[in-house]
Image (cartoon, helix red, strand yellow):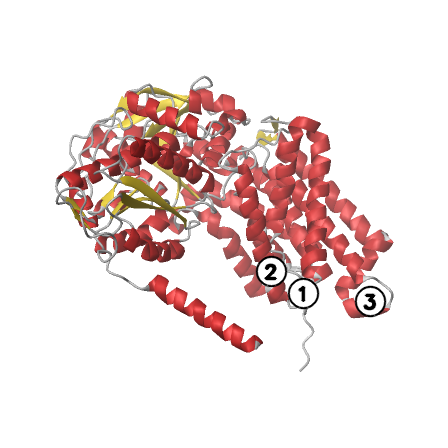
Amino acid sequence: MKHRTRTTLALAGTIALLAACSTEDPDAGGGGGSAEGDVETGSGVTDDTITVGMLTDLSGPFAAGAAVQVTQTQAFYDRLNEEGGVCGRDVEVEVQDHGYDPQRAVSLYRSMAPNIVALQQVLGGPTSAAVLPLAEADGMYLGGHGWAGVALEYENAQIPGTTYSIEGANAVDYLVDELGLAEGDKIGVVYFVGDYGSNSLEGAQHAAEERGLEIVPQEITPRDTDLSAQVSALQQAGVSGVILAAAPAQLASLAGVMASQGMDVPIVGNTPTFGPSLLETTAGPALLENFYTVTSIAPYSLDEPGVEEARELYEAADPDGELGWEVPLASAQARLLTTALERACEEGDLTPEGVVAAMRQTSDLDTEGLFATPLDYTEVTEPPTRTVYVSRASADAPGGLEVLGTVEGPSAQSYTFG
Amino acid sequence: MSYFLTQLANGLSYGLILGLIAVGFVIVFTSTGVLNFAHGSVLLTGAYLVAVLQDPIGFWAAVLVGIAGAALLGVLINAVLVRNLAEANPGTAAILMLGVDILLLTELTRRIGNRVLPIGAPWGADVVTFGGITLPTSRAIAAGLAVVVFGVLWFLFARTGAGVAMRAAAADGDTASLMGIRLTRTGAAGWALAGALAAIAGIFLASFPSPGIAPTLALTAFAAIPAWVLGGFDSVVGAIVGGLIIGVVTALAVGYESDLHFLGRGLGEVVPYAVMILVLLVRPSGLFGRQEAVRV
């Protein structure tokens, strides 16, 4: 008897697994019919709902920031639905947890694809790299994958702002044009190896060549939270500024050690380097003194209508939540997809391919300050903008960053992709 | 010269902290035969307790709770999971520990979130300077304390009945058991000791120049694995020496990377394992490991 139960269980498991692995035609599911005039629909769209997917990290290393984005995305669509939704339909979000595991992300994508019209988000570099080619083959929109330059190879990917490389190039331009570095100076670049940090380094290297500076690279991993040795090496090399493409723990160590060794030079970080809780650590004073950040997405404190709306939504949805760049980012990503869905509806093609085509017709899109300039997605291999926000650490601004302005330096303009 | 000495002092102090972690690996392995891959999350648990309690009850009281908490967690893992294994197979236990590590780490990640929790130590971000060398005060204290702790361990193992019982149990469990030594007790003592050492290491690893407690702290424990292995798996002295070697080699590799650029970037990450492999090639049982008796 026991054996039979076991066999049945094994069989059931196998069948479930096979079902999950089956590569069903993404166009097969969904309504097929049309409530709104003659809109063609495919997977993920019925007469009264549009379903979009989020593959995110709710149990892995980026769980905390990812949860903020889920909360904010949900709040955005709840409000949108109250206001009438898109194409006469409510937008529903299907959230799945890939735990930062590319293999799991692929399986989840396979099981989700027949039920969604677009992927609002695949969070994480390695996870989105695994899903992007599959989604491209299915003609499925994929957004919210971060800012790695590799995404510009895919027609179906909508990058939320510019790339890490353009951030890195702008960082060098800003150091030279505003923070007093000159030709012949050295800039340290401390970076995570991989599609984030290495991409930022490429941009910085290009800019340094253009402006006649020298880059001193220091490669690290997320495990390195004591950067004493790296700072000593940078000090020995005599750098006049440091660019950091890492995470908050590394930023705090870098700033703290530099201050303790009397290294009073500016630090410019990419978007993911800063978190407001850093100001409460021992590195707080050093950060207030020397930390700047270049970001595609507006910082939490920016006074522009798009960001104000995001703040208001978030504070209602999670009054005790952490105030970071994830909040405006999630709003911006949801706005990008909503724009594509609305255009697809107007064009009468609300299939996954129709959404991608509509996204690629988006030009001169105003996001009310969520991004630094209007966005243009008509060229696949070009970033939609090359302008970034520049902010510095501030004890008074909500989210810990005070916006100084926007930058699109000469090296950011001359950087080529491909 | 002072650059070299600074990097050397950095490496030695970091190496002593690695030694504290590596000794924990050794003690658990010799007392219960378990490759404790949950050591990192035990370390993080101890440090996390200090970070959340330092505000309400003060830093020093929080340190005591953190150390006791990590020791207790070790004892619990041993009592509830390890001792209930049907057969004492190192492979099974190691995989079980990986599972425990994932569970603990997921819960701690959920609690810590994307914050960096300050440890609130009185030495803050101070540095000490002597003879042209600048060293964070926390590292200088860590180095001194580690030496004291190693001294206490030597005394414990060499001069006390409980320590001798633990060594006997490690050397030959069956015989020790026949001699009236209770292996459950020596096992529990080993896990408690390892947990306490991990918590102490965690407090210093989360102090300046590190910013505080973040979930990645648990991964730092894995940096002690090369130290443990090259020291010889079952030798406390080996673990300490291994920690020092790995600490110094890593600091120098990072510090002189620009002169070693023909070896590529990110040298500090690879060098501990390269050194470990080199040592194992020359001495397959590690620097101080017990030679396996081979019968021909």
Amino acid identity at mark 3: Ser
Residue A187 on image: x %, y %: 36, 31
Q: Is residue B296 left or right of residue B110?
A: right
Q: Residue A359 or A383: which is nearer the viewer?
A: A359
In which quadrant is the C terminus of chain B drawn? bottom right
Under circle 3, the secondary element is helix
Label 3 crowd (10 A; few <14 / some 14-19 / many >=20): some
Residue B269 on image: x %, y %: 47, 49
User: Which chain hosts label 1?
Assistant: B
Q: Is residue A150 left or right of residue B15?
A: left
Distance Cα–Cα, label 3 vs label 2: 25 Å
Image quadrant assignment for residue A166: top left
Q: Is residue A7 above or below residue A304?
A: below
Distance Cα–Cα, label 1 vs label 2: 9 Å
Q: What's the mark number on residue B96?
A: 2
Under circle 1, the secondary element is loop
Q: Is residue A288 left or right of residue A367?
A: right
The residue under the point 53% across, 60% down is B278
Under circle 2, the secondary element is helix
Q: Residue A210 or A280: which is nearer the viewer?
A: A280
Residue A218 on image: x %, y %: 41, 40
Whether residue B248 is visible to the viewer of this picture, yes or no, is no
Q: What's the mark number on residue B177?
A: 3
- Per the image, the residue denoted by label 1 is B85
Amino acid identity at mark 2: Leu
Amino acid identity at mark 1: Leu
